[in-house]
Image: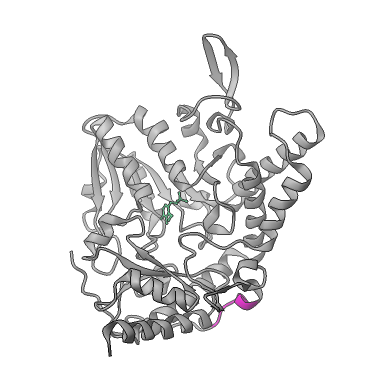
Amino acid sequence: MKTDHVNTCPAGNNIQAPNKTPLDADKIRNDFPILSRKVNGKRLVYLDSAATAQKPRQVIDAIASYYTDHNANVHRGLHTLAEEATAAYERARDKTAKFIGSVKREEIIFTRNTTEAINMVAHSWGRHNLKHGQRIVITQMEHHANLVPWIVLAKITGAELEYIPIDADGYLHLKDINDIINSRTRIVALTHMSNLLGTINPVEDIIDLAHKKNALVLVDGAQGVPHLPVDMKTMNADFYAFSAHKMLGPTGIGVLYAKDDLLGEMQPMQYGGEMINEVRYNFADWAELPWKFEAGTPNIAGAVGFSAALDYLEDLGMEKIREHDKMLIAYALERLAELRQFKVFGPKNPEHRGGAVSFVSPHVHPHDLAQFLDMQGIAIRAGHHCAQPLTKLLGESSTARASFYIYNSQKDIDELITALEAAWRYFAHV
Ligand code: PMP
């Protein structure tokens, strides 16, 4: 499919760009030390939050304070530091459980990232529950993290892998969904929000439908939970995976939320210390949930930093963050539409999408564009965004992507547009 939705109308069909935001991005920006540095002599305009978000001082301070005052290993020590470290680590679990809709704390498994969380499901649930003739359903817009584990699982088990297609506007094409998710389907795995198209998928409808067919649903929430209010009780996903680093937290810690009855039946992915109940020379059995899935010393400092990130997001309010995102995306689409030489991918309606906007221009390779913008202090991403099949489906080998978060303002988008115009003039020799 070669998409042909080059901008023909500003911000889409009669869609008004809201210009009010409930967040004060300039004030928020002051909380992020890195945003006060200069890049190539210019004010840093960070438009790569879909890759990783910047960290506020509160998160950096929490990690420093943990290592300065409380560092010890968790769950096994009887001394003061060990008790403090354990309490801080487990407090992070409680906060995470509350943040995604007050689920049970034993339903929160700390992983390294989204990728590891999805692999855990493919490994610990998939290998024991899928067989030849059964079906795994994913979509054509998945990040490799929610694609490769299922390709491998299908090969190992003999299950077939089926795709929900996308349409030219970057939405899931749901016309044949009843045939795609059929009675042989055991699991549906789809992204909450596409990291390339920005599309927010109707996950609740798909979960309802899948459940009617007795299939489970895994939602890749890597881009969802940093930007949208998320409540597992209303969403009713069986598995939801996300990474702290895309929501102001540190790298190296992520989350698998899973319903406790499923976790109870699943085998651990890794074996060793911390995850056992009793070990003899020829016998071992497993600890209670959630520790059964957390073998070895966990990322304690990461959990502490993540706690601080959750506090920060909660103080701002996820509803307000979503409103702010919508304002930015609407404004960005409107301004990008002024650049007739650029083709923008994904839904035009800000209600249906988040703040990751991919675009291309016939005269400028996305990598050149990213380097040109970097000279102006503007950080965007270029490449296939870990979605090679989707990039190819769009008829491209790479795209440029600008992505927004709480510290971005209309001023950042104005600077992006000015730099894109300059890049186009430079590379197209006009
Ligand atoms: N899924 C989506 C939609 C993503 O955007 C990303 C990160 N780019 C991932 C999964 C993987 O996240 P991580 O690298 O933190 O595991």
Q: Position of residue 294 (x, y in %)?
A: 56, 33
The reply to whether the magenta stretch includes residue 310 is no
From this view, report whether residue 423 is shown above or below residue 217. below
Residue drawn at the location 76% of the way across and 42% of the way down: 70
Identify the image quadrant of residue 337: bottom left
From this view, report whether residue 416 is shown above or below residue 152. below
Instruction: Tell me which segment is drawn in magenta.
Output: 20-26
- The residue furthest bottom is 430
Residue drawn at the location 57% of the way across and 34% of the way down: 290
Q: Position of residue 209 (x, y in %)?
A: 33, 49
Q: Position of residue 256 (x, y in %)?
A: 50, 43
Of residues 32 and 312, the one nearer the viewer is 32
- The residue furthest front is 40
Predominant secondary structure in magenta? loop
Q: In the picture provided, is 421 more to the left or to the right than 137?
A: right
Residue drawn at the location 46% of the way across and 58% of the way down: 223
Indicate the quadrant containing the C terminus: top left, top right, bottom left or bottom right. Answer: bottom left
Q: In the picture provided, is 64 more to the left or to the right than 37?
A: right
Of residues 176 and 121, the one nearer the viewer is 121
- The residue furthest right is 80
Residue drawn at the location 38% of the way across and 37% of the way down: 122
Identify the image quadrant of residue 365: bottom left
The answer to whether residue 187 of the structure is visible from this angle is no
The answer to whether residue 38 of the structure is visible from this angle is yes
Identify the image quadrant of residue 248: bottom right
Count of marks placed on residues: 0
Of residues 175 and 83, the one nearer the viewer is 83
Q: Position of residue 210 (x, y in %)?
A: 33, 45
